[in-house]
Amino acid sequence: MGTLLGIVIDILIGALVGWIAGILMKSKGGFVRNAIMGIIGGFVAGLLLPGWLGYVGAVLGACLVIFVYEKFIKK
């Protein structure tokens, strides 16, 4: 979107995606961490996938980010 409102909406959608991914992955990281991971996954998926596929990809991307974090980074 590019505008300030668009960026805020993208962040909110990313946080929602992170929350959904946290539920799917049974993550115990809490809402804030999952929201940040959702924003990261959503950003990457938004760059790679067009339209509504971006939302599906954002959830999958957030799940992947949570998985990598919990398996390799979090000790």
Image: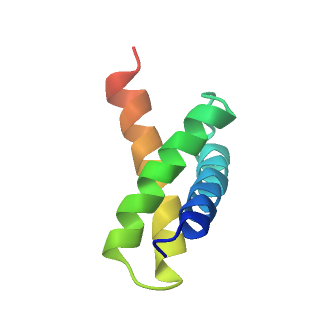
Horizontally, is 12 left or right of 67 in the view? right
Quarter of the image for residue 27 reads top right
User: Is residue 68 depicted above or below 75 in this figure?
Assistant: below
Judge whether residue 61 can be spotted in this image: no
Judging depth in this view, the residue of 29 and 14 nearest the camera is 14
Judging depth in this view, the residue of 9 and 46 nearest the camera is 9
Q: How many marks?
A: 0
Q: Position of residue 1 (x, y in %)?
A: 49, 76
Judge whether residue 53 can be spotted in this image: yes
Residue at x 62%, y 51% (from the top left corner): 15
Horizontally, is 20 left or right of 51 in the view? right
Horizontally, is 3 left or right of 74 in the view? right
User: Is residue 42 depicted above or below 22 in this figure?
Assistant: below
Residue at x 67%, y 46% (from the top left corner): 23
Residue at x 66%, y 30% (from the top left corner): 30
Q: Position of residue 62 (x, y in %)?
A: 48, 52
